[in-house]
Image (spheres, rainbow, N blue to C red):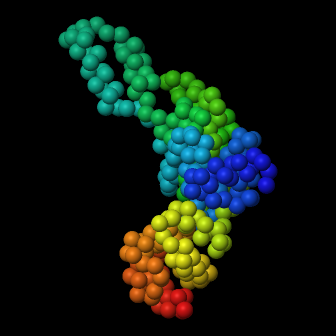
Amino acid sequence: MDTGVGVLARRLERTGYLCDDQLATVLFLALEMGRPLLLEGEPGTGKTALAEAVAEALELPLIRLQCYEGIDATQALYDWDFPRQILHLRAIEAVAGPGGERDVGEAEKSLYDERFLLARPVLAALQQSPAVLLVDEVDRADDEFEAFLLEVLSTYQVTIPELGTVQAAVPPTVVLTSNRTRELHDALKRRCLYHWIDHPDLEREVAIVRSRAPEASQALTRQVVEVVQRLRDRDDLLKPPGVAETIDWVRALERLGTTDLDLETAARTLGAVVKYREDADRVRAALDRMLA
């Protein structure tokens, strides 16, 4: 592995995030080239965790924009602190007194001073950069919001009509995640470097869980990971467990004093690893075969 890539991978490892060579390489290139990184994959594969690890490894603030259906540019950019603006107006009136003269234009202008500006994640990232901007679950937003993001990521600047243009002195490190509930537009993908994150293989997942839950025995960790890997191989689960659920299950079992995963304890703690009733029923019925 390239020296720079290797150094980055080791810095991530110190935060508890273990990545393979391909992911470490594309992340290194995104940082070196100043390009956004688009991560796609099933829920629970560590997309959001990577952005958090990058921020920790680079000692940068993490600014997160959680996307959702109906989100628009206002939620991403800025808003005005209306209660404080009203108090400001009342203070002006109190100083002027009843019937006192005041410059209406100046009063209006003072309402849109930067002290009344509420920076949302995208604007905050531009103002605070260098920083890591995480645009989480961008696939949940609509086409219009995607176009807005593309514009911002092309110039790393936004215009506030009342204040002017805000441009990042240093472009933020941008990580976008998608669970691929819909296809993103080619224009946004072209702006980014891309990586699909799969669930880790057995040995890598054991290593990840050991790094996050070192208090659990290696034998118990391996047992749990083997069961989770079998669960992911099934095609009848509404939501196969991710690595986060594997870690939760190992921690739950360790707190119960479990050293060897048995049928009864596994059945009682399924709520840590499967999150739908139908999935729990299917898994409970098959646990005896999985633990055999």
Q: Give the tally of numbered discs.
A: 0
Front position in the image: 12 or 181: 12
Front in this rendered view, residue 104 or 225: 225
Extreme residue toward the top, this view: 101
- Above or below: residue 55 compared with residue 208: above
Asked if one can make out residue 239 in the rendered structure from this viewpoint, the answer is no
Q: In x, y percent, where is residue 249?
A: 46, 72
The quarter of the image holding the C terminus is: bottom right
Q: Which residue is rendered at x = 57% and y = 45% of the image?
A: 55
User: Could you say where residue 245 lies in the image, as x and y percent from the top left?
Assistant: 50, 69
From the top left corner, tell me how far across and down residue 15 is, in percent. 57, 52
Quarter occupied by the N terminus: bottom right
Above or below, 178 against 82 in this view is below
User: Residue drawn at (51%, 23%), measured in percent from left and top?
Assistant: 163
Asked if residue 10 is positioned above or below residue 237 in the image, the reply reads above
Q: Residue at x 21, y 11 (%)?
A: 97
The residue positioned farthest toward the left in the image shown: 98
Residue lying at 19% horizontally and 11% vertically, measured from the top left? 98
Q: Nearer the viewer, residue 145 or 105?
A: 145
State whether residue 255 appears in this view: yes
Quarter residue 137 falls in: bottom right
- Towards the viewer: 106 or 45: 45
> Residue 170: image x %, image y %?
64, 31
